[in-house]
Image (spheres, rainbow, N blue to C red):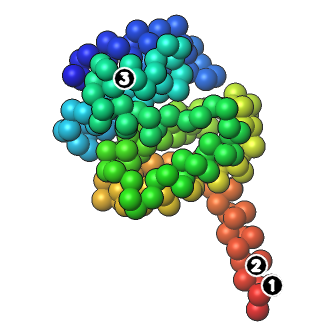
Amino acid sequence: MINKAIAFATKAHAGQVRKGSRLPYILHPMEVGMIVSRMTDDPEIITAAILHDTVEDCPGVTPDLIKEEFGERVASMVNAESEDKSRSWEERKAHTLESLNDDTALGIKLIALGDKLSNIRSLHHDYETGGEKIWDKFNMKDKSKQGWYYIGLCESLKSLEAYPEYEEFCLMVDHVFADVIAEMNHKDDACLKAED
């Protein structure tokens, strides 16, 4: 099943590249699959991790096609990780944060962590080499809003704190968004003083 998912995702993502680079996009879902495989040996969760962006980003790939090829459980996990691109960036990210609650299935959370860890690793690398100009490659160029999202993910995925991957994710978020975190703390302190 995992080998089939690799072949399927490679074909589906053919010609796509990562934002701000010339790297083939398939490297991202493969990394997500590898991260998730360190946290679980469940083949359906690993398969869904590899396929997680196919419905969202690949023409002709639908939830029904994923269900037909890989089964209902894989399709439901891929669907949970897919964003509705008709909504605004803020709406999509708020929905993601809200959907990763205590009732969310472990498999969905592991895929979300794998996806976001792959993303923050890439961000961290680009931040170390390019500094603040890295935000220019994104549709959402406001670092404080990006920070709000990533800091929120640390909170939403807190139930996974026993996994080393969660610790790595939050450490990188703390580094990339240190100034955003400091500003948020400053505002919180100001609010507390105003209440006193």
| Dot 2 and dot 1 residues touching (CB under 8 Å) | yes
Residue topped by disc 3: 66
Q: Residue at x 33, y 25 (%)?
A: 67
Q: Position of residue 45 (x, y in %)?
A: 28, 37
Residue nearer the viewer, 92 or 63? 63
- Give the SS element for disc 2: helix
Q: Position of residue 157 (x, y in %)?
A: 43, 55
Q: Mark 3 or mark 2, which is nearer the start of the sequence?
A: 3
| Dot 2 and dot 3 residues touching (CB under 8 Å) | no
| Dot 1 and dot 3 residues touching (CB under 8 Å) | no
Instruction: Give amino acid for label 1.
Output: Ala
Q: Is residue 34 above or below residue 156?
A: above
- Give the SS element for disc 3: helix
In-image side of 103 versus 58 (left or right): left
Instruction: Give amino acid for label 3.
Output: Ile
Q: Residue at x 69, y 46 (%)?
A: 90
Few, some or many residues within 10 Å of mark 1 (<14, 14–19, 20+): few
| Image quarter (top left, top right, bottom left or bottom right) of the C terminus | bottom right
Q: Residue at x 47, y 8 (%)?
A: 14
In-image side of 50 versus 122 (left or right): left
Q: What mark, if any, has residue 191 been given in the picture?
A: 2
Q: Position of residue 85 (x, y in %)?
A: 63, 31
Instruction: Give amino acid for label 2.
Output: Cys
Residue topped by disc 1: 194
Name the quadrant containing residue 192: bottom right
Q: Separation of disc 2 and disc 1 at Cα?
A: 5 Å
| Image quarter (top left, top right, bottom left or bottom right) of the N terminus | top left
Specify whether residue 148 is in view. yes
Q: Separation of disc 2 and disc 3 at Cα?
A: 48 Å
- Give the SS element for disc 1: helix
Q: Position of residue 143 (x, y in %)?
A: 71, 45
